[in-house]
Amino acid sequence: LKEWMSTAKSDDMPEQPIVLGFSQLGTESAWRMANTSSVREAAKESGISLVFKNAEQSQEKQFEAVREFIRMKVDVIAIAPVVESGWEDTLREAKLAGIPIVILDRFVNVEDTSLFVTTIGSDFHEEGVKAGKYLLDKMRNRPGPIRIAELQGTAGSTPSIRRGEGFRSMIGENGDMIITQSAPADFTESKGKEVMKEFLKAPAEKRPHVLFAHNDEMAIGAIEAIEEAGLTPGKDIAILSVDGSRRALQLLAEGKLDAVVECNPLQGPLLMQAAKEIMAGRTLPKRMVPPEDIFTQERAAKEVGRRKF
Ligand code: AHR
């Protein structure tokens, strides 16, 4: 990826500022806000003129945004799609209009992959695998059954689907680990709290030992629900989440979370680079994945001050 980025030359970029239409899916999390800021700042720094539309979790609004970008004849369209399915017709309209599409953050599930130029985003399956591996290691000496509750993200969204699959692919190897409760909580703190409250209504002998939350906001909401139920997060229930926001790392350092798998929202520079490359007629890799890690309690205290979101 680095090699590819370093091949970009500024002297053969077009004179006119590139116009980039970006359909962002919403504002549900600190991750999302950081993703939006990263795109806005990188556009400014690269001299790219950004037309930004917030879809507020509505795929219909994303379709409308793309149609508007087509009417405006923007040079490149970027979409962070709220869900994976249902994109064929809209992407085809853009292709027929000759406007290249970049898929950012999440994916689209389309048979014809020529409908987009490239996708820039995390390996969500691997994030689920990392959470599962961490749990297997943490519980290696503990006799089963270990009951796991799962707070999924938005139903039908790539991170929710793939994180769930990756996690299951790991814990499936150990018959002692069972997902006993699982429900979508839309990647938001309020819904995470609400669904966790429901989970905790189970009788004590069925209560989860572990919570896997597909993002930090839902984990934070769940921590509130756990504390309100008179239980101690990190002690009575081990908690894993994904993203790595400052608030989550603070809770990790305090021992209320057990591990946070990193998901990197700072995708703006890569998106601008891609837009420039496309306009310069270069071929891009079909998929670009930023490197990511996992934060443990030991690392959290050091990292928390450095977090950008
Ligand atoms: O698509 C990335 C996910 O979306 C992040 O994990 C989550 O916080 C956001 O809502």
Image (cartoon, rainbow, N blue to C red):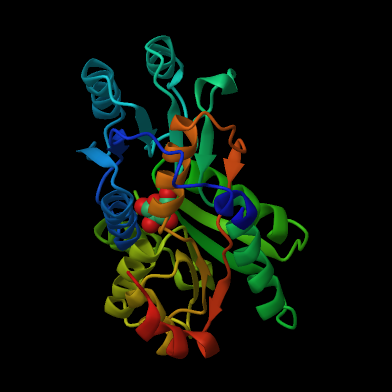
Instruction: Look at the image and tell me in which quarter the C terminus lies.
Output: bottom left
- Residue shown at 38% from the left, 76% from the top: 307
Taking depth in this image into account, of 226 and 23 the one nearest to the observer is 23
Q: Residue 284 placed where, x, y %?
A: 58, 36
Taking depth in this image into account, of 150 and 229 the one nearest to the observer is 150
Q: Residue 167 placed where, x, y %?
A: 62, 57
Quarter of the view holding residue 56 = top left
Q: Is residue 24 above or below residue 255?
A: above
Quarter of the view holding residue 180 = bottom right
Taking depth in this image into account, of 72 and 294 the one nearest to the observer is 72
- Residue shown at 48% from the left, 61% from the top: 263
Q: Residue 274 placed where, x, y %?
A: 47, 41
Instruction: Please give left or right for residue 267 compared with residue 134 in the image.
Output: left
- Residue shown at 78% from the left, 59% from the top: 173
Taking depth in this image into account, of 129 and 290 the one nearest to the observer is 290
Q: Is residue 225 above or below residue 289?
A: below
- Residue shown at 24% from the left, 28% from the top: 61
Q: Is residue 44 above or below residue 17?
A: below
Q: Is residue 255 visible?
A: no
